[in-house]
Image (cartoon, rainbow, N blue to C red):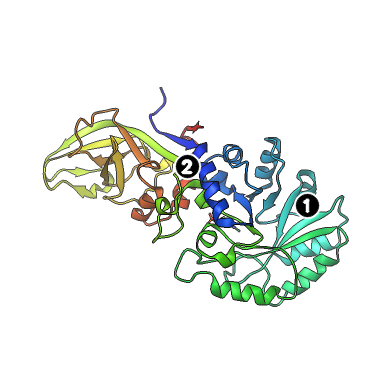
Amino acid sequence: MPRPIRAVVKAAALRHNLQVAREAAGEAKIWAVLKANAYGHGLERAARALAEADGFAVLDFQEAARLRLAGIRKPILMLEGFFRPLDVNLLFKYGLTPVIHNAEQVELLKHMDFPAQLDLYLKVNSGMNRLGFGVDDVRLMYNTLRLHPRVGNITLMTHFADAEGPGGVHDQLRWFNELVQPFAAPRSLANSAALLRFREAREGWVRPGLMLYGCSPFADWNAEEIGLQPAMTLSSELIAVQNLAPGERVGYGFTFEAKEPMTLGVVACGYADGYPRHAPTGTPVLVKGQRTRLIGRVSMDMMCVDITDIEEAYIGAPVTLWGEGLPADEVAAAAGTVSYELLCALAPRVPVHEEA
Ligand SMILES: *Cc1c(COP(=O)(O)O)cnc(C)c1O
């Protein structure tokens, strides 16, 4: 038998969350964002479950090729465009839509003969200062690409830095509108947070990622309130039980000391499985469906949990690390990170089971 840890991915939850995105998106079309192995859920698996999306967004050509090989015919958006001149051939081979975000990419395309029409996205830097063209060159780049006889549709795209936070999207949206004001072109603006919270960002093509997997980008609006269902549940079992007397300590660095008699369970899950090592004592965990807390330091293959008040929690008792009954968002918050990082970090050694 393998170690008891496993992740279950529910296709029905992915489909449901896409429906929530669809309702929020109104008339806008949906790129389902599948980067980072579909946020840890499995690229092909997620693409199959999200087949009703209008297209899929990825980063790597390898991911795009895998989607085509899996029979996916829908548009595929390359979120970082292409990385090397040779990659341009792959755009045509696989029929991909690149995001063009730097002058080198434009320079290369400008002098190329294309074997077919190429639709592309032009990335506008509206303030995040990561990818895209700003005030100095967005018009020049647009016009250069527009003049290419085989460039088809150009969609204007930007990305928000704080759609989930106090900043919102308004300053960036205003600047974006100013930058692209002369061009009558379709747009793609919204990630999950902008899609859910800002009506004015829901036009053209929206790009939800996190929400499809059942997590919330917001600190003040949780997944259940939004109507999302967790798509991934990470679970394991107790593989040992220890009784502690007051003054006894637990784990590497002896970071936890029992103040009174207590019982702890050792869970077959550690940071080599993708559980965050920096999750502190107190991080929520479910044992036999009951909420308890992590204690001491997470080690590579194991972690300890308080089972003092959980009846009949013997070896083999089921443990939920996140997912159904325990939102990944809550575990992430306790660990000082975001659910994005937890989901993406799921280690290849954890077997993933798919549920319809
Ligand atoms: C990852 C990504 C998204 C999806 O963001 P979520 O917050 O997961 O919805 C959208 N657009 C771009 C450009 C991205 O890189």
Vertical placement of residue 34 versus 70, above or below: below
Location of residue 194 with respect to 71 vertically, above or below = below
* Ligand 1 visible in quadrant: bottom right
List x then y, in percent, for residue 313: 23, 32
Residue 129, x across and y down, in percent: 59, 70
- Amino acid type, label 1: Val
For badge 2, the amino acid type reads Ala
Q: Residue at x 60, y 49 (%)?
A: 32
Which is more toward the observer, 141 or 291?
A: 291
Graded by Cα atoms within 10 Å as few (under 14), some (14 to 19) or many (20 or more), the crowding at tag 2 reads many
Compare marks 2 and 1 and give the one earlier in the sequence.
1
Q: Is residue 294 left or right of residue 73?
A: left
Q: Which of the 4 quarters of the picture holds residue 50?
A: top right
Q: Residue furthest top?
A: 1
For disc 1, the neighbor class at 10 Å (few under 14, some 14 to 19, many from 20) is some
Place residue 239 in its image quadrant.
top left
Residue behind mark 1: 88
Q: Left or right: where does residue 325 sit relative to residue 30?
A: left
Between label 2 and label 1, give the one nearer the viewer.
2
Residue 38: quadrant of the picture: top right
Nearer the observer, 210 or 64: 210
Helix, strand or loop at mark 2:
loop
**Which residue appears at 38% of the width and 29% of the height?**
4
Compared across the picture, whether 225 is left or right of 192 comes to left
Residue indicated by mark 2: 231
**Pointer 2 with pointer 1, Cβ within 8 A:** no
Quadrant assignment for the N terminus: top left
Give the residue at x 68% y 70%. Answer: 133
Q: Position of residue 327 (x, y in %)?
A: 38, 47
Report helix, strand or loop for mark 1: helix
Question: What residue is at 36 percent from the left and 50 percent from the top?
Answer: 331
Q: Distance of mark 2 from mark 1, alpha carbons?
A: 34 Å
